[in-house]
Amino acid sequence: MLDGFSARPGGGWCRHCVLALLGVLLLLGFSTSAWARPVRLWHAYRGEEQRALEEVIATTRVGAVDVLAIPSDAYAAKLAAAIPLGEGPDLFIDAHERLGDYVRQDLVGELAFDPTAYVPAAVSGVTIDGRTYGLPLSRKCVALYVNRALVARSPEWLEDLAPNLRQPLPPGHVLLAYENISAYYHAPWLAAFGGRFLQNGDSFGFVGEAAERSLLLAKSWLDQGWVLGHADGALVTQFFRAGRAAYAISGPWLAGDLHAEGVPYDVVPLPKLRATGLVMRPLLTIEAVMASPNGARSSAALALALELAGADAARVRMVRAHVVSARSDVVPLDDPQLQGFQAAADLAEPMPTSAAMRAVWEPSEKALRKVLNGTAEVRPALLEAERRFRDVRRPGPPPASRTGLLMVVGMILVFAAFSLVKRAREPEFRARLRASVPAYRYLAHAVCALGVLVFAPLCAGAVIAFTSGRPGASEYVGVANFREILSARGGPLFASGSFYFVLAVTVAWTLLNVAFHLGIGLTLGVLLSRPLLRLKAVYRVLLILPWAVPSYVTALAWKGMFHRQFGALTALFLQAKHWGIDVEPIDWFARFSTAFTANLATNVWLGFPFMMVVTISAVTSLPSEVLEAAEVDGATRWQRFTKIILPLLRPSMVPAVALGAVWTFNMFNVVFLVSGGEPDGETDVLVSEAYRWAFTRQAQYGYAAAYSVLIFALLFASTRLAARLTGKVVA
């Protein structure tokens, strides 16, 4: 009957049933897929902490978990970019001091938990305005590592570090190793004088008598050679692991790197300062698992968060990573090192969760580095840091009327429509359009790809440049961002960090790099094109290696070469002294001239192979008859080079020079990785300055986008002008 019924004219009941059944199955499939989607977890752990997290995840009862490790430097930026689009994690592990900024950007959701299971400092660290935004995992702070092979007993006072040594330190050893160029590691020195980086009311605290005295003390220890100078985390780890430092100030992350090294050491709280009687209190970081707004609504994500913050997971982290648990119901292990971190955490000062804390680090570190480098007096450096903090923290421009924008856009659209209609009425235009239809078919995919990858981001950046505020809650402010940039934000037009100063540095950077690239590349390309040169292939491979190696690898290697104490250039200077040449090591990043030279040398090394390859290709394609005729006519080698080869190379080299200039103008890696903008941001170029406004200065994306629009306008205008001038000369 069913077959007969379905075969009747107009009888589509079975087909409808089948379609409905398929729809239900498809809906169930989507629902099952959404229900079974793994919980996405992001973290920035490494070493033993990462292995401890993996061990906890392996025993979870939640189900599938998609774990992704993100580099710590890019962690906050990736969260801010991914979560508003719904593509970010459900859960992420981060320090509580970023929580205020995350709440301001709507990147976190509320998480309720039983506060009695955690120590009060951990609960307050994840609480803002009475709402909790994370489950505390651990308490982290720096402590004093004591090398028992060099130190007889742990010091109670900072002034007793040297007297407690077993014997005077041999050459190549230091008394204390810590990241002295980091404001975070300077916080204990500041606390020993009763100061704080951020005062009540979100006012800048790294100014005044306490800040000045702390800087003078740190500078005196550095000048006396007691402290490892210009040290980053890798250098501190290297020195202490090799037994070349009597003491080190670091956190539990250093213990993970020392786990298998056999270095005899103790961990104790930081000592007191006899001059004030106060303890060097470090900043306490509450590490917590936080949920994105979507993750806060997921039962699976919440279940995983509870497991990560549970007592069993806390014991795993204590055993494997030597981190102090944030839970009050977990008894510390009978481990002297872990107990040392526990005692240090009990004395530490919780870091503020205010969004203003994110604006403290950059100006404070600039002041710290200038003082330690000896390029600035203490009080002016601190006052400049306070001015920069206030400049970054000041409110954005007020909203502007959209009437003017709509009128401009309307006029542009009317003009474009009028032009199109006028051209469409021309018979020749219609004929050319019909003839070009086959070509448009071949170009359609490329146009779509460029539209999505190039033109859409450009248009989006241009739109953002006229807004201010956090993503998702930005307001139209007209040309206020451009006005702020071009007026140097009300300060001196050519002060460090102003648009005009950075533009001058960028232009000088571009011109010098392109000149060296072209000169070295052209010379080597012509030499390697000689037909009688032996081993040409070997030379070409060796000289093209700088271009083949990733630029960030080369930049980090060259930065190490320029280190004042342990760089390769310093080793050469010290060797020159043995030969009777009196050359002192250079602090390359303490002055603009030397820091700019370091950046320039690195980028020249990276850039000349491109010009060399272009030159070799161009010289190979030159007509040999012309060169042979010139040689028969008696032209010298120099005359052949200047009168024949160079003019013939010009059509090939001009586009290469233009492309190299654009690359160099936007060369971010070298400037950011080698000098980092030092000293005092003077070696920053426009693209690195735009990056800082977007990712290190209160996430001012509209202001950074305005910088990007100006960069695009400058490059577009300069390349068009160069093309026009070149065209006139060639004609």
Image (cartoon, rainbow, N blue to C red):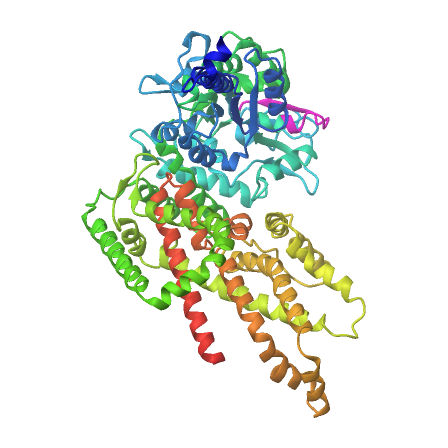
Give the total number of marks visible in the rendering: 0
**Residue 330 placed where, x, y %?**
54, 8
> Which residue is located at x 63 percent, y 39 percent?
174
Q: Is residue 1 magenta?
A: no
Is residue 494 shown left or right of residue 602? left
* Residue placed most toward the observer, 27 or 706: 27
> Residue 180 location, x and y as percent?
52, 39
Q: Position of residue 580 (x, y in %)?
A: 71, 63
- Up/down of 579 relative to 279, above or below: below
Query: Relative to 322, is 189 above or below?
Result: below
Looking at the image, can residue 438 be seen? yes
616 lies above or below 460: below
Q: Is residue 568 above or below residue 363?
A: below
- Residue 636 in the image: state x and y as whole percent: 69, 88
In front of the other: 40 or 313:
40
Q: Quadrant of residue 360?
A: top left
Quadrant of residue 696 within the rendered picture: top left
- Tell me if I can see residue 281 in this picture: no
Give the magenta-colored segment's residue range: 256-269
Seen from this angle, which residue lies furthest right?
534
